[in-house]
Image (cartoon, coloured by chain):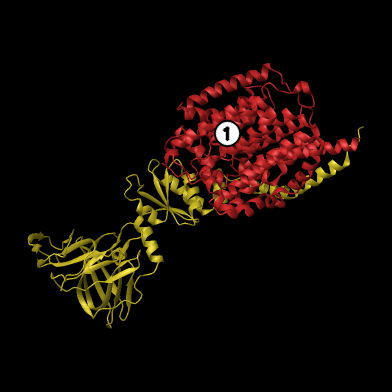
C-alpha cells in the first residue's frame, strides 16, 4: 500500500469543513423548506414564498387583457416590485413609470398604456390615474394652512373650479374650507357647471369642512368649470385655486352675479379670458367689440394677448401665468 | 419534466456532436453552442425556429452517432468513491430543492429568465421585447443563457420558470464534472475529484440565493466557460499525465469557442475573453489567431445586435472608461473589494486563504502553469477593480452585490492552484 501524504489530506479536510460548516446547515434548511412546499401545487408554493403580493399579481394576470400593454406605476422605493410584477405578468407587456408624474409626462405619447397597475411591495392592483392622484394629494399637505374665510353668505358663485394636471409638477386643485357658524346644520348644494353635476354636503353646526381637492372629492372628476354654492344656512368659506406642484394659491372671490369690468393689470404667458354665463338662459355678450352667444351655464375660455373689454350679462375674468409659474387672476370690478 | 429532459439530453448531445468528451464538458459545450449559434442566427435574421430545428437535427444526430461510433480519446480514470459521494450529496439535495421550490432570486427573474421568456414568446432576439415594448431593465445584456432558456421554454410550450430550474443546476453539475475531468487529467485523479467536491460545497455556488445554483444568474455558466478556456490554456502549458490522451489538434478551436461563449454570456465575458487572448498569445503563439477570430465574430455579433436595440439602464463601461481618472477616489474601495470578500467566511470559508497559500506552493512546482492560473486570476480581478473605479453606481453598493459573484468567475484557476499545490506537497513528501 502506498503511503498517503498527511498534510494535503488535513489541509483538504480543513478546507472542506470550512465550506461545509456554512453550506450544510443552509442545504438542510433548503431541503426542509422544499419538503414543506412539496404537498402544495406549484402556484401555491409561489404564494407561500412571496405572500399576498404574488397572489395580487396572479389575480391581475388572470384579469388583465393579454394583448393590452400595462403601465406599472410605482414609488421610487418599489421599483424592484414592479420589475418582478413585469416578470410574472409577461407576456402581458408592461411599461414602468416611477411615480405618477412620470406617467402624466408621457401623456403625449400615443403608445402610453391606458391600463394602470399600481405596484407596491405589498400588492399590485389595477387602478386609475384619478385614484393615484387623489392618493398622492390626500397624503400631501394643503397649500393654504390658514385660509381667510369670507363673510357669512348662503348663495354664491365660484367663478373657477378645477381639478386638473398639467405637465409635472403642475397640479391644480381647489382647496376649500367651509365653516358653518350657525346653530343649525347647513345643507350645502353644490352644482358644478357646465356639466350640471350636483352634490349635497352637510356641515354640522359650528363645524368646518376642509377639502384638499374640492372638485374631485365632490364629483370624482378631473375637469374645470364654475360652481354654484347654495346653502340652507349662512357659510363662511374660503376657496383657493391652488397649484400643489408649485405650492402657490390664489383666493377665489365668492361672486354674487354677473360682472365684466376686468381690472387692467400686467399679463404674462398662457393668458386666457374666461367667460361664464350664470343664467339659466342663453345670453349674448360683447367681447372685444364682437357679440357672442353663451349657452345657459356656459364656461368658455380662449387665449388673449391683452385684457379685453367685455360687456353683457356674464361674468368675465382673465387668468395669466407669471414666469415663475404662479397663476394670477384679473377679476372684474 | 420535459424541461428536465431537454436540459439533460439536448445540450449534451449537441456538445457531443463536435467530438466525444465527458458529459460535463459536453453539456457546457452544447449549451454554449446552442446559445451562440441561435444568437448568430438571430443577428443574421434567420428565424430562430428554423435555426433551432437545424441545431436539434444536426446536434442530436451527430451527437448520437459520435456516442455510438467514436470511442473517447480520453479514457476516464476510475473515480475515487469518497470525493464522488461528497460531490453528489449537495447536487442531489439541490436537485430536490430545485424540483420543488420556485425561483426567487433577483437578477434571474428581473433580467435573465425574463429575456428567455421574451425570446421564447417572440421567437426573435430583436423583436418588440428588446425594442422597448415591455420592461426589460438590462436590455443590452448578452443573451446566450437566455437563448438556452428560450429553447427549453419553447420546446416545453410553457413560459413558467420551473422549466428552467434544471438548466442552472445543470451548469453547476457540468462545471464540477469538467473540473474533475480536467484536473484529473492535468494533476491527479484525487486532486480532480476533491476539487470538484470542493466546488459544489462552496456556499457561494451551492446555496447562495443570489448567484448560486438555485438562482438563475449567469455567473456559474460564465465561470464554467472560463474554466473551459483556462484548462485549454493549461493543457497547452502543462502536458497531460498521459501524452497519448492529450488533444492538441482541436485545442485552439475549443479555446476559441469557450471565449466566444464568454463574450455572449455576460458583459464581463468580453474583457475576460480579451484577458485570455492576451495570455493565450504567450501560450499558443501564432495559433492564437483562431481563438481571436472566434472571439471577434462573437463580439461583432454582440455589438451589431446591441446597435439595433435600445440600451437599458446598464452601465456602458466603454463610455465610462475615459472618466476613470476623475474617479480615482474609488480606488481604495475597488482595491479592497476582493480581499475583503475573499475572506467572507459565510460565502467562501477558508477557500481563498487556501488558494493564496496554494499559489505560493504551486509556483515552486510548475512556475509556468502556476503563472497562467495566477495571471488569469489577477488580470480578471484587476479588470473588475477597474470597473469598480469607473462605475457611476455607489461603489460600496456595487461591490456588496457583485464582488462575490465576480470571484466565482475565477474559481477554476483557483481550484487548479489548489490541485497543483497538493501535488507539490505530495512530491515533496515522497522525496
Tell me residue B185's x, y (percent): 76, 29
For the point 35% across and 70% down, the residue is: A143
Tell me residue B178's x, y (percent): 70, 32
Taking depth in this image into account, of B170 and A233 the one nearest to the observer is B170
Q: Against B315, is A248 above or below?
A: below
Q: Residue furthest top?
A: B69
- Dot 1: element: helix
For the point 59% across and 42% down, the residue is: B217
Q: Is residue A74 left or right of residue B26?
A: left
In the rendered image, the quadrant that contains the N terminus of chain A is: top right
Taking depth in this image into account, of B321 and A144 the one nearest to the observer is B321
Tell me residue B98's x, y (percent): 62, 41
Colour representing chain A: yellow
Taking depth in this image into account, of A11 and B2 the one nearest to the observer is A11
Q: Residue furthest front?
A: B325
Chain coloured red in this rendering: B
Q: Is residue A31 left or right of residue A246?
A: right
Q: Which residue is mark 1?
A: B3
Q: Mark 1 Cα within 10 Å, few/some/many (few <14, many 20+)?
A: many
Q: Is residue B233 left or right of residue A304?
A: right
In the rendered image, the quadrant that contains the C terminus of chain A is: bottom left
From where the camera sits, is residue A27 visible? yes
Which quadrant of the structure image shows residue A295?
bottom left
Number of marks present in the image shown: 1
Taking depth in this image into account, of B392 and A28 the one nearest to the observer is B392
Tell me residue B17's x, y (percent): 62, 22
From where the camera sits, is residue B156 visible? no
Which quadrant of the structure image shows residue A329?
bottom left
Q: Against A24, is A254 above or below?
A: below
Amino acid at each position: 500500500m502506498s503511503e498517503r501524504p498527511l498534510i494535503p489530506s488535513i489541509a483538504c479536510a480543513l478546507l472542506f469543513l470550512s465550506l461545509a460548516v456554512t453550506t450544510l446547515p443552509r442545504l438542510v434548511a433548503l431541503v426542509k423548506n422544499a419538503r414543506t412546499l412539496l404537498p402544495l401545487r406549484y402556484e401555491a408554493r409561489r404564494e407561500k414564498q412571496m405572500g399576498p403580493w404574488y397572489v395580487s399579481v396572479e389575480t391581475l394576470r388572470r384579469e388583465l387583457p393579454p394583448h393590452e400593454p400595462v403601465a406599472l406605476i410605482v414609488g421610487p422605493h418599489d421599483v424592484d416590485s414592479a420589475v418582478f410584477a413585469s416578470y410574472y405578468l409577461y407576456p402581458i407587456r408592461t411599461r414602468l413609470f416611477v411615480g405618477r408624474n412620470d406617467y402624466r409626462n408621457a401623456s403625449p405619447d400615443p403608445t402610453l398604456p391606458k391600463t394602470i397597475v399600481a405596484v407596491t411591495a405589498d400588492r399590485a392592483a389595477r387602478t386609475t390615474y384619478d385614484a393615484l392622484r387623489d392618493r398622492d394629494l390626500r397624503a400631501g399637505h394643503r397649500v393654504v394652512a390658514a385660509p381667510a374665510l369670507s363673510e357669512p353668505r348662503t348663495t354664491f358663485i365660484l367663478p373657477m373650479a378645477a381639478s386638473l394636471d398639467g405637465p409635472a409638477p403642475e397640479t391644480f386643485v381647489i382647496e376649500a374650507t367651509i365653516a358653518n357658524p350657525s346653530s343649525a346644520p347647513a345643507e350645502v348644494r353644490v352644482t358644478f357647471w357646465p356639466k350640471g353635476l350636483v352634490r349635497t354636503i352637510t356641515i354640522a353646526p359650528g363645524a368646518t369642512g376642509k377639502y384638499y381637492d374640492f372638485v374631485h372629492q365632490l364629483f370624482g372628476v378631473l375637469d374645470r368649470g364654475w360652481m354654484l354654492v347654495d346653502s340652507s344656512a349662512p357659510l363662511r368659506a374660503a376657496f383657493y385655486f391652488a397649484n400643489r406642484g408649485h405650492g402657490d394659491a390664489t383666493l377665489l372671490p365668492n361672486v354674487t352675479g354677473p360682472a365684466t369690468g376686468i381690472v387692467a393689470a400686467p399679463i404674462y404667458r398662457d393668458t386666457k379670458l374666461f367667460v361664464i354665463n350664470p343664467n339659466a338662459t342663453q345670453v349674448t355678450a360683447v367681447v372685444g367689440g364682437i357679440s357672442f352667444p353663451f349657452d345657459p351655464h356656459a364656461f368658455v375660455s380662449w387665449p388673449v394677448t391683452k385684457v379685453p373689454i367685455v360687456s353683457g350679462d356674464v361674468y368675465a375674468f382673465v387668468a395669466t401665468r407669471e414666469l415663475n409659474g404662479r397663476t394670477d387672476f384679473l377679476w372684474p370690478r | 419534466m420535459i424541461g428536465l429532459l431537454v436540459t439533460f439530453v439536448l445540450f449534451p448531445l449537441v456538445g457531443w456532436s463536435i467530438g466525444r468528451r465527458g458529459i460535463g464538458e459536453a453539456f457546457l459545450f452544447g449549451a454554449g453552442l446552442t446559445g451562440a449559434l441561435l444568437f448568430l442566427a438571430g443577428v443574421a435574421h434567420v428565424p430562430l425556429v428554423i435555426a433551432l430545428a437545424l441545431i436539434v437535427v444536426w446536434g442530436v444526430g451527430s451527437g448520437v452517432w459520435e456516442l455510438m461510433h467514436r470511442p473517447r480519446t480520453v479514457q476516464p480514470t476510475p473515480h475515487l468513491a469518497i470525493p464522488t459521494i461528497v460531490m453528489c450529496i449537495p447536487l442531489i439535495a439541490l436537485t430536490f430543492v430545485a424540483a420543488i421550490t420556485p425561483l426567487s432570486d433577483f437578477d434571474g427573474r428581473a433580467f435573465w429568465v425574463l429575456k428567455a421568456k421574451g425570446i421564447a414568446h417572440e421567437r426573435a432576439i430583436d423583436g418588440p421585447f428588446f425594442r422597448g415594448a415591455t420592461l426589460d431593465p438590462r436590455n443590452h445584456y448578452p443573451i446566450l443563457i437566455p437563448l438556452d432558456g428560450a429553447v427549453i421554454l419553447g420546446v416545453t410550450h410553457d413560459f413558467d420558470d420551473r422549466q428552467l430550474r434544471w438548466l442552472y443546476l445543470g451548469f453547476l453539475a457540468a462545471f464540477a464534472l469538467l473540473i474533475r475531468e480536467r484536473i484529473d487529467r492535468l494533476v491527479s485523479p484525487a486532486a480532480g475529484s476533491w476539487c470538484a467536491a470542493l466546488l459544489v460545497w462552496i456556499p457561494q455556488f451551492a446555496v447562495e440565493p443570489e448567484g448560486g445554483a438555485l438562482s438563475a444568474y449567469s455567473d456559474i455558466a460564465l465561470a464554467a466557460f472560463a474554466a473551459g478556456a483556462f484548462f485549454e490554456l493549461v493543457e497547452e502549458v502543462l502536458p497531460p499525465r498521459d501524452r497519448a490522451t492529450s488533444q492538441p489538434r482541436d485545442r485552439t478551436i475549443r479555446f476559441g469557442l469557450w471565449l466566444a461563449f464568454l463574450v455572449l454570456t455576460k458583459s464581463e465575458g468580453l474583457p475576460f475573453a480579451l484577458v485570455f487572448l492576451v495570455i493565450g498569445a504567450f501560450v499558443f503563439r501564432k495559433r492564437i489567431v483562431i481563438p481571436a477570430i472566434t472571439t471577434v465574430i462573437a463580439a461583432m455579433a454582440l455589438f451589431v445586435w446591441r446597435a439595433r436595440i435600445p440600451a437599458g439602464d446598464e452601465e456602458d463601461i466603454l463610455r465610462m472608461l475615459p472618466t476613470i481618472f476623475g474617479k480615482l477616489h474609488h480606488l481604495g474601495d475597488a482595491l479592497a473589494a476582493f480581499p475583503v470578500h475573499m475572506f467572507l467566511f459565510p460565502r467562501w470559508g477558508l477557500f481563498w486563504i487556501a488558494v493564496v497559500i496554494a499559489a505560493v506552493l504551486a509556483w515552486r512546482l510548475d512556475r509556468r502553469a502556476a503563472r497562467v492560473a495566477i495571471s488569469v486570476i489577477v488580470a480578471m480581478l484587476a479588470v473588475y477593480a477597474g470597473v469598480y473605479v469607473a462605475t457611476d453606481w455607489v461603489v460600496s453598493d456595487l461591490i456588496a452585490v457583485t464582488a462575490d459573484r465576480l470571484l466565482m468567475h475565477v474559481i477554476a484557476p483557483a481550484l487548479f492552484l489548489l490541485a497543483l499545490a497538493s501535488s507539490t506537497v505530495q512530491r515533496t513528501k515522497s522525496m
